[in-house]
Image (cartoon, rainbow, N blue to C red):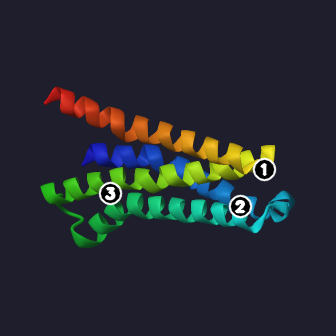
Amino acid sequence: MRNIIEEARMVLPGIQALFGFQTIAVFNQRFDDLPATVQTVHLLALATVVIAIALIMTPAAWHRIVSPQRVSESFVKLSSRMICAALFPLAAGLALDMFVVCYMVSGSAAAGTAAAVLSLALLLTLWFILPLRERHRRR
């Protein structure tokens, strides 16, 4: 259980900071100048980060309410799965916001799309593909 708590503690501050920056962005004057579709992409990015936060925070809330005195093996497995699952919407949110930022800088939807796709590919490779390959190799 200690490892799960440490993993959540490592990821959560970054996600919370990202959420804060995403939220503040809508109050920036330049945000109003973006096309409605790009603003919608940012809203989707914000929503996916909220999903990631919910998944990461759920094990702690669940543990405190259901069984604060003991930790079952099934709870540890569930917690680990939720933390891993949180990385999918987090990667999506980061990639979507890469689109928004690149669009803002370049004015090009193609550049934004390329940045988003490359970001998503990088994150999924580092967070899932390489670790799963290593796990498979060790078996």
Residue at the spot 36% in from the left edge and 64% down from the top edge? 58
Q: Nearer the viewer, residue 80 or 70?
A: 80
| Residue 65 to residue 86: above or below | below
**Residue 72 seen in the figure:** no
Does the residue at mark 2 contact the one at mark 1 (Cβ under 8 Å)?
yes
SS at mark 3 in the image: helix
Circle 1: residue type: Met
SS at mark 1 in the image: helix
**Residue 87 seen in the figure:** yes
Q: In what quadrant of the picture does the C terminus appear? A: top left
The answer for how far apart the CA atoms under marks 2 and 1 are is 9 Å
Mark 2 or mark 3, which has the lower sequence index? 2
The image position of residue 123, as x and y in percent, is 47, 40
Residue at the spot 29% in from the left edge and 72% down from the top edge? 65
Does the residue at mark 3 contact the one at mark 1 (Cβ under 8 Å)?
no
Camera-near label (2 vs 3) is: 2
Mark 3 or mark 1, which has the lower sequence index? 3
| Residue 131 in the figure: left or right of residue 11 | left
Circle 3: residue type: Met
| Residue 69 to residue 93: above or below | below
| Residue 65 in the figure: left or right of residue 30 | left
Q: Nearer the viewer, residue 107 or 25?
A: 107
Mark 2 or mark 1, which has the lower sequence index? 2
SS at mark 2 in the image: helix
| Residue 138 to residue 100: above or below | above
The answer for how far apart the CA atoms under marks 3 and 1 are is 33 Å
| Residue 50 in the figure: left or right of residue 29 | left
* Residue 82: mark in rendering: 3
Residue at the spot 20% in from the left edge and 33% down from the top edge? 136
From the image, tell me which residue sits under label 2.
38
* Residue 104: mark in rendering: 1
* Residue 52: mark in rendering: none
